[in-house]
Structure formats: structure tokens, C-alpha cells
Amino acid sequence: MGAYVIRRLGYGAIVVFGVLFLLFILFFTVTSPDDIARKALGERVPPAVVEQWKINHGYDKPLFPAPGQWADNMLVEHYRRMLTFDFGRSDADDTPILERIRKGMGPSLALTIPLFVLSLLVAIPLALLVAFFRETYIDRAGVILAVLAMSVSVLLYIIGAQYLVGKVLHWFPISGFDSNPQVVVRFLALPIMIGVANGLGGDIRFYRTVFLEESNTDYVRTARAKGCGEVRIMSRHVFRNSLIPLLTRIVVAIPFLFTGSLLLESFFGIPGLGAITVDAIQGNDFSVLRTMVYIGSLLFVVGQILTDLSYALVDPRVRLE
Amino acid sequence: MNLKSIHSGARGLGWIALWALALLACNNNPYPATEGDEKVLYSSFREAPRSLDPAVAYDTGAHAITGSVYDTLLEYHYLKRPYELIPGLATNLPSQRPGDPGYTVYRFDLRPGMMYENDPAFALDEPGRTTREIVAADVAFELCRLADPAVNSPVVEPFSNIQGFQDFGQALTQRREDPAFADLPVQDQYASLGGISGVRSVGDHGLEVAVRSDYPQIQYWFAMPFTSPVPWEAVAFYDGQEGRPRFADHPVASGPYRLDQYDRQSRMVLEANPNWYGAMHPEWAAPGAVYPSEGAPGDLEAGLLAPEWVGQSLPFIDRVEFRREKESIPYFNKFLQGYYDAAGVIKESFDQVIDEGGLSEEMAEMGIRLEKGVEPTIFYIGFNLDDETVGRPGGGPARKLRQAMSLVVDSQEYTRIFTNGRGIPAQSPLPPGLFGYDDGYENPYRQVDLERARELMVEAGYPEGIDPATGKPLTLSFDTYDTSAQGMLQYRFFTDAWRQLGINVKVEATNYNQFQEKVRNGAYQIFMWGWVADYPDPENFLFLLWSDLARSKSGGPNTANFMDDRFDALYLSMKSRPNGPERQKEIREMRQILEVERPWIELFHREDYALFQGWLENVKPFGMSFPMTKYRDLDPAARASHREDWNQPVVWPIWVGLALVIVLIVPGVVTFMRERQ
């Protein structure tokens, strides 16, 4: 298993190196450092100010290695900074990027962890319920509702819920965030509800399919023949044996809890990493955007490895070699 | 106690905790309950300011903070219109005396005994010290920062009128080539160069600034945070190193408020500054530290001069909370729920809020007030007067062509369609509220008159818009860098108007860089532009047509390349003249020149519609982006009462939902179980 992990880490490193190279090409050759500087400073600033800004941000060196400058160029600097997590400062407002990430992680996790756990707690029992009542009107209605829920844009969920729950029913604040323990639950309740509702349709359909597939297997038929109760079959046997496909979906999502939710954070004004990413896109903040894409690729690799490891943990038959 | 009862107790506690959590959550109040009785003003921001450095910050968002935390030598009277300067940190308006030839020396006297807000930066010079007195050298230091190219201040150009200002900036650049000099702290660098030659501290509280005599408008800049006193210790201490924030994120100032919290992503909080001179020395009753006793006509009737406020020490509000609101609809809905004290009118809710130019009945019933204020702005269509067809080389016929084109553009209709009517049609470059604006003036070429326009087209040599040289409709280009669908619709409005005269105007939309390139090369005919005043003086609008600043001549903001000797002479005379009948006469003559020459088709002056809750008091729109928070007051009890009335949770849908679930699920479960059995 150790060898397997090392091999996967090696593959992951290659992916990350590739992503970093693509990022460099996209962010420094398609958009030149001069363009980045002018977007940050405005179009009318004198050239001397642009040059000074480029020096301050490390954009004044040659792009690629050249004779005599094998180490002192932007490509090498880009790799050095990213791999050592020295992300530098924001192009837009000069704040240290690492500090922003550190500050943004709390609100993101405050949103995504309950959202993730609640989604599982709601979707898996509901999927089990629908599978339990298979081929009844509850099953058919459940599937239709799930398809409907999947078809509705998350924007409609957000705007509709803000209007209905926040404006008309006055249950929760329409938007905003405050880390004050007295009020933080109020701010997170609505985005979590929306996040759960938005993911519910797809989750129920997926889990239902997995459970139904499992409930048609021979050992389940044997259990039924032996007089085992339906509830016991679903919870003890079907659910436990469906864990591998479930884990594929669940474990790979765990690392992305750190990056937050782009739309929910943006619409609800939650100052997490998702909102920081959206702000960076809107504000042409290339250095922050570069960093967030890099972090996303790292988390993707971590997610893949964790998923593989989790197979071995839940199914003794799986051997990672 | 047996195990079962422990289990049962734990379960009960769990349920209680769950319900408590639900009750805590089931409330739409975004603020802690403890804030209900405090005099806290709730406001919002969309994007965090890029910088709070007073030498750099130049946008409205930043000014909402810097304008409250940085006090200035002069400031504007809150109520009087036209705008009037009053002393702030200075004891009086500056005295003037002749300086070197061509220069006038302005003398400011700072009030002795004023202190900065408490800050650890002051320990840099003297361990244990948390504040110190504001001295004239701090203003001189800030002026040096404006001249410093490394600071990258956006207002170098107007301050270049100070004697030695540019030389100081150049000397700094040269000396910094020496690494030993460049490594010195900036205050030592400035000191070693002797500061700006035209800026001199006289003792601790006297400041003399030598400015070109033809630029008396410099006084307005001393009412802006660019010229606030800045302690050198703050700039040296807050360098972004070793965990310290940058000075751009950590103001150290002397205004009525201090920045208490600054989270760029979610929240900014100002709190009353106990070290502010108005708070420390109410006995001074300084003009900028007490509520005014005089105002403009109508202010008394509007309740703005009520005895409970006149002469009272400022500020009335203890704390200002800015919460981030990126989306306009949730922000406006929170205003309607009483969680913000003021709001703009968003276009999505315009019809709900405004009815025939006034407040809708629904809003009025909630006690909300609508305040309108014309901003010192001008939006206009300009002609490139270097162009052969529409400009000077075309002579009289080109002038008549411009006049004809001006006569068919309906500003009233334009603002109705594109700005929800928020804007008043412009008759000249000068907006209301400024000296020289004439309320009764009607520009004969800005009244829609299609017949007269067609006659002028004939006189211009383009009967029915036909160009005799080609025998086809006259074709002109409208150059812009706005490629959005909304922009295209706006330009279509103009091109349709000109099509009535038979003129075919093509919209040439490019990106900003290409547009700039066209402007640099003079390859444009018609463009649309706007101007927002830096200060309320007619000079700040009329300079846009001064020939020395023509784009083709000097790269200046006179993009129309208007050049008229008589206009220039009047401009230079008017510029350095104090407000009075002579200046008024000159402005009138300049206006007449523009009326006939038509370098611009004046469109509109932007009008700001702002909504205020009934519990917010002393509100008068200011027009310019100066936060006048210190003059405002509010009634927290009335606010709490309204919030409670407006935000009662509606719970019946929960019971309906539960009933629905039971009705739908139970029969299915029962049937299923029966079938299974």
C-alpha cells in the first residue's frame, strides 16, 4: 500500500506540475505583465509607475529561462513560489494572499462542513426510503421530484429562497455573514438549506440507483428468503455493501470543502474562499486567481488519493498495490 | 439514577438544545440583539476600497472611510449652497499674501492641542507613547508624499501648482538611484531633500504653501483627505512587514471617527474617536465640530435647523457599521426590512419606489424619505473639432452641422429611457449648485426643434442630410469603447435622432486600448464622455474646453480639441477671480461662445436618488462624495420598533408543510406495509 501511495503521489505531482505550467502560460503569456499592471493601476498611469509596480510584484523578469538567467526568470519563480506556498500579494489590493486564504477558510468551512454533513444525512436516508418503497407511488414521485430538483438552476434556488424565506417569511437574514457566535447560525441557515436542496435531487437519484442495484443481488434475496426484515436488509446489508460507489462520490468532495462554494458565498456575501475566487475573477486579480486554481488542483489530487485509500478501508477485498 | 434515565435526560437536553438553536436561528435580524439601543448607523459597501491611504484613495467607496477618519484643514459647510468652505483643523480660512513672482502664499494656522487617535505607531519615536499633537509638519509631510512618485498619488497634476512640488518629486527619483539614500526611511529622505520648497512649517502650528497665483482652487484640495495631516510614524510603522498591516489598510488619523475594524471581505466599522478635537475640546465650538446654525433657503422648513441640534457638539452617531453587500437586490430588501438606514434606488425596484418622480405610496407609508440631489457632473456628446467634416476645418458649415445635430438630441427622453429619469437636462457645462449656474438659462440649441435643425442642415450644405460630394447621406462615426448591449442601445438613441436629419452615424465600438489609440491619433469624430467634479468651482468644468488642455495639443482632457481665443482669455481671467458679478459676467460670455460653437451637445447632470429611513435625522444630500456622517443623527428606539413590526416571522407554512408530508406519505407507507404482509 505504501508503494501505491507513493506512486499515486508521483502521478499527482506530475498533474500539479502540468497545471502550474498551464497556469503560467495562461496568466503570463496570454496576458502580459504590462496588461496585469495596467489593470491593477488603471490605464492612465505613467510608464514609470507601471515599471515600479512590476518590480514590487516580481513581474519585471524575463518570462522564460535564457542563457545566464536559468534561475532568475518568471517561470522558475512561479514554480518556486507556488510549490513553497509563497503566494505573494494580490495584484488588485496588495494584501498577502496567504493571509486572505487563511481568513477565508473559516467562513468557507463553516458553510461547507454542515452543508456536506446535512446533505448526506438527508439524501442517504431519503434515497434508502425511496429504494425501500420501490415501484410504489412514493418511489415514482421521489424520482420525478429528484429530476425536477436537478433541473432547476441553483440561481433560482438562491433568489427564490432569499425572496421567500428571507423577505416574505422573515425566517433568516436575506444575506450576509457575521462570525459573532450570537448570529452566525442565522446567516448560515439559509445558504445551507439551499445547498442541501440544490444537491438533493442528484444525490437521491444516484444513491437510489446504487441501493436498488445492491438490493437485487443474490445475497439480499437469500436474506429475504431467510426471513430477514426489509428495514434490517436495507440498513445492515444494502447500505453497507453500497459504500464503495458512495465513497467515490463522497470522499472526492471532502478536500473541496476548503475552497468553499462559489455561488452560495458570492450571493450570500459569505467571505470565504469561494467569494474570494469570484472577486478575483471580477476584479482581474490574476495572482489570487492563479493561487486558487493551483489550490484546486492540489485538492483534486488529494481527493483522488483519499478516495482510493478509502476503498481499502471499507472493503477488505480491495488491495492497493 | 439508572442508565435508562440518564439516556432519557440526555435525549431531552438534546431536544431542548436543538429547539433553542432553531429559535436562535429563526430570526432575520443580521445584527446581535445587544446593538438595538445603540446609535449605530448601518451602511453597506460593494467592493472594499483598494487603499485607505489618503494620498492615494480617490474613489467614493474609499472616501466613505477616509472622509470620516481623516480630518482636513478646511471642509465644506454642511447645509449652505452654493458650496462654502469653512475652517476644519485650521482656525480660519487661509490668509493670502504675494510670494515669489507668479505665486501666492496661503497661510494656514492649525489649532494647538489637537491630537491623533491612539495607535501603537506613536511608540516608534517615544516608547510608551500612544498619541501626539497634530503639527503643521504633518501636513507638509503629506504634501511630500503626494509628490513622491513611489506613492503614485492620482492628484499630482493639481498639486503641481505648488512651488517646487514637481522638482521635489524629480529630486526624489534621482536620489533614489543611490541605494544608500533609497534605504533611508521616507521621512528621512524627504527631510534630507529639505521638503517641497513652496511648503514651509512656521512653528508647530503655522503652515505656508506657495501656489501659482492663477490657481486659487488649491483651497478646495485642502478640504479633501489628500492634504490631511499624516504622522510619519504611521507610514514608517505600518509597512506590511512582520505581521503589521500596510498603512493603506490601517489609517492613523485625527477625524471624528476612527477605523475600529477592517475586514475587506465583509465588514468595516467606524467608531467615534475620543481624541478628535471636537470631542476633546467642545468648548472651542469650532465650525467643523458643532452642528451649523445657518443653512440654505428651505433648510429651516425641512427641519434641518431644529433647535435640538443647532450648536450641539458632533458627532451624534457613535458607530458606523459597513456590511458588504455584493448584490443589489438583497441589499435593498434589507433596507426595506429596516436593517440599513439608507439606500440608493436600485433599477430593479425603481417602479416600486418611485411614482411620478416622487416617493411611492407604499414607501411613504413606511416612513421612508426620498432625497434628490444633483451631482456636480456633466455628461455630453463631443465633436472632435480637428475633424474636417464636423470641426474647425469645416468652418461655418461644420458649425451649423453641429448646431443641427444638437437640436435633435432630446436629453429629457434620454434620461427617461436610460437613467430612470435620474438626471436633469444640461443647458451648459455647469451643473446646479455651482457658482455660475443659471437656473433660468435655456440654451437655444438644446431645445428639440426638428424644423430648425433641418433648415440648419440646408445652410450647412447638407439638404436632407445628403453630402453633395458623394450624393449619398452624410456618414459620420461615433467612437466608443463601450461594447455592451446597453451601450449600443444608448448610441442607437443618438443615431436614430440624427437619422431624422438624414445623417448616417455609424457606431464604431472598440476596446478601450483601441479607443485610446484612436483618440491619440485624432481618428475620431463624435464621442460621449462624462465628468465628475473634483471640487465645486466652475473652473473644474470649464477647463475641459481650454485650448491649452486640448487632446491634440497637449494630451489633456479637452477631447473636443476646442480652441477659441476669446474663450481662453475669459477662462484664464475667470479662473483666478473670486466669485462675484465680474466672474458671473465672464462665465456668461463663455457660455454664449459654447452655445454657438457647439463643441459639445450637453446631455444631463446626474441626479442621485437616495432613500432614508424615517428614524435617520439631519439628512441633506451633499452631491459630492463627502461622508457627512458626523452631522447625522438617528433614533434607535424608533428603529427597533419598526424593525420588530416589519419582521415578524411567518410560521404557518411550517405546519402546512408538515401536514402535507403526513397526508402524502402516511397512506403510501400503510398501503405498502399491508401489501408486504
Image (tube, rainbow, N blue to C red):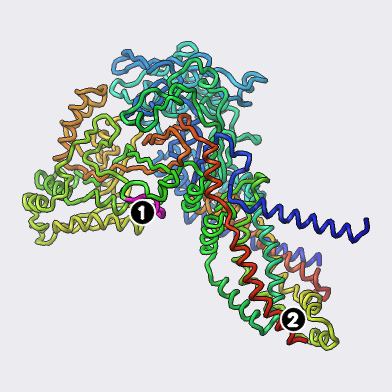
Q: Residue B361, percent across and down?
A: 38, 49
Kind of residue indicated by mark 2: Glu
Indicate left or right for A158 with B623 as reference. right
**A194 in relation to B119, above or below:** below
Q: Spot the residue most to the top.
A: B203
**B408 in relation to A223, above or below:** above
Count neighbours of disc 2 (C-alpha within 10 A) and say few if under 14, some if 14 to 19, many if 20 or more: some
Residue drawn 71% across the image and 76% down it:
A129
Q: Residue A142, percent across and down?
A: 63, 76
Q: Chain of mark 1?
A: B
Tell me the number on the disc at residue A214: 2
Quarter-of-image position of residue B374: top left
Q: Spot the residue most to the right.
A: B2
Count neighbours of disc 1 (C-alpha within 10 A) and say few if under 14, some if 14 to 19, many if 20 or more: few
Q: Secondary structure at mark 2?
A: helix
Quadrant showing the C terminus of chain A = bottom right
Tell me the number on the disc at residue B511: 1
**B535 in relation to A124, above or below:** above
The mark closer to the camera, 1 or 2, is 2
* Start-end of magenta stretch: B347-355
* Residue A47 counted in the magenta span: no
Tell me the number on the disc at residue A171: none
Give B581 or A171, whichever is nearer the viewer: A171
Q: Chain of mark 2?
A: A
Give B588 or B662, whichever is nearer the viewer: B662
Kind of residue indicated by mark 1: Asn
Q: CA distance from mark 1 to mark 2?
A: 58 Å
Q: Residue B450, percent across and down?
A: 13, 53
Q: Is residue B326 visible?
A: no
